[in-house]
Amino acid sequence: MNKCESLLKIRGLSKHYGDHQVLNGINLDIPYGDVASIIGRSGSGKSTLLRCIQLLEDFEFELMSLNGKPYGYREKNGRKIRLKGRELAEERSNVGMVFQNFNLFPHKTVMENVIEAPIHVKKMSKKEAEEIAWNLLRKVRLEDKVSSYPAGLSGGQQQRVAIARALAMNPKVLLFDEPTSALDPELVKGVLDVMAEIARGGMTMLVVTHEMPFALNVSNHVIFIDEAKIVEEGPPEQVIKNPTHPETKRFLDSIL
Amino acid sequence: MEDLVQWFTGLVIWQYRSLIIRGLTVSIHVTIISMIASLIIGLFIAFLRLGRSRITDALATAYIEIGRNTPILVTLLWTTYVLPPLLGIRIPNYWTAVIALVLQTSGYLAETFRSGIEAVDKGQTIASQALGMDYFLMMRRIILPQAFRKSVPDVINNIVVLFKTSTLVSIVAVPDLMYQASRLVSQLFKPVEVYSSVALIYIVIVFVLSAFTRKIQLRYQMRERGETVATVKVPRI
């Protein structure tokens, strides 16, 4: 992968909880417009990797760059200084995340959920934010639910609101942490369709998922993580249809 | 006999109504002032307990335990007769009474707020951070509103308890309803009528407050269950 084309570049990302090594020397290149599926067993470190990329966790690394610039830290006299406080918060808004449990704000309406961050983090005017929100909510087909509270929506609808809420901040990369795992089966397709549309629109996405059809048909890049390391990586035809590594074969056999 | 009691009760309330209203007014504003101070201090103490410093956590816990575990009468007598000479200043009994009430109530509220904040789903924090919110923005817009909603029943309960506890301030000559009642009894030698009337007044007020609590609780429960839809108009663009 051409260095200049990487939107997100990671070298040597490691993380441990006490004795347990969760991520071990992860190297990743995500080009602009890449739609990458991250697959692997539970506990393999997939979700932790996403949380590290979203700068929600502490971790060690050799290099982290977003759009060609250092991401999550500052260089000073050859030392890497992690961002903190408000700077860290601002940096986080460059990346968006959609969670397995949606995490919508229950005390706010759908519209209020979507405009909250643009108004208070990006300091947009209410009018501007609402315009953006309307467009996004139309895209996810929820324009008739703008005044509803999350508790009055189905899981699929809530997840689509969560997607709109993340998109409202115009992130450079959008992360999805098992976005359909908590949904009733009949609601999964609605969310996957929205994700496919976003992918077609050119958004760079990293999706931790168990939905193999999505990984195969929508993503162009599959990353198999096992025991804290990237074991195999490549186009879906290769990783899913013709895996080279025995571990990959074993994992796919166990789920397909 | 019952009719007689009611007749005299009515007579007493009506004849000395200005005294009773004055007393009730004092009871009410003692309660309100103590409540507002307790809410502010309680929230502050809650944050001390939630912070990273072990020292402030220990201090906050000590404050809470002393406030809650000391009988209110003891606290009241202490703030009125021990605290002023200790500090070398004169403090009007009205304020020593308020301080005593606040010492106790803020302890309970601190725990209410702390558990309310901790009860907010951790996913809310993660989602707020992912959207780029810093700590204060997240607390102000996302966490505290939810924590407060969870705390409302407890807070209103504390108001009712505070109102009932405020009757004790009469002991240090703060002219609340109980104080006026005692004065009336010593003047009229009619304890049955006076205390019956006053008891009735307290019962009615507490009953109204409790009914109000239940209504508020119901409304917040309904919101969480998604049975209401916002009535705010969102302009269609």
Image (spheres, grey):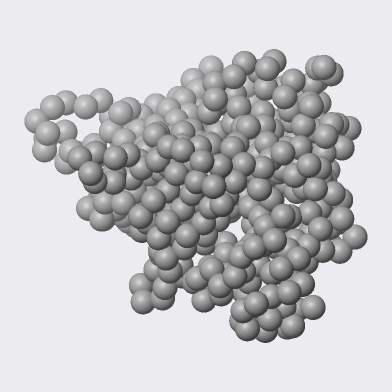
Figure label count? 0
Q: Please provide percent x and percent y for residue A168.
A: 67, 32
Describe residue A133's horizontal placement relative to residue B51 as left or right: right
- Which residue occupies 31% across, 51% down? B52
Q: Which of the 4 quarters of the picture holds residue B39?
A: top left
- Which residue occupies 36% across, 77% down? A19
Q: Please provide percent x and percent y for residue A111.
A: 74, 30
Q: Quadrant of the C terminus of chain A?
A: bottom right
Q: Which of the 4 quarters of the picture holds residue A39?
A: bottom right
When the figure is inspected, residue B59 is found, relative to residue B169, above or below; the finding is below
**In the current view of this chain or complex, which residue is farthest to the front?**
A2
Near-viewer residue (B56 or A160): A160
Q: Which of the 4 quarters of the picture holds residue A95?
A: top right
When the figure is inspected, residue B205 is found, relative to residue B2, above or below; the finding is above
Q: Please provide percent x and percent y for residue B51.
A: 34, 48
Is residue B1 visible in the rendered structure shown here?
A: no
Near-viewer residue (A36 or A239): A239
Is residue A38 visible in the rendered structure shown here?
A: yes
- Which residue occupies 63% across, 32% down? A170
Q: Please provide percent x and percent y for residue A232.
A: 59, 70
Near-viewer residue (A221 or A256): A221
- Which residue occupies 62% across, 32% down? A169
Describe residue B215's horizontal placement relative to residue B59 as left or right: right
Near-viewer residue (B188 or A19): A19
When the figure is inspected, residue B211 is found, relative to residue A243, above or below; the finding is above
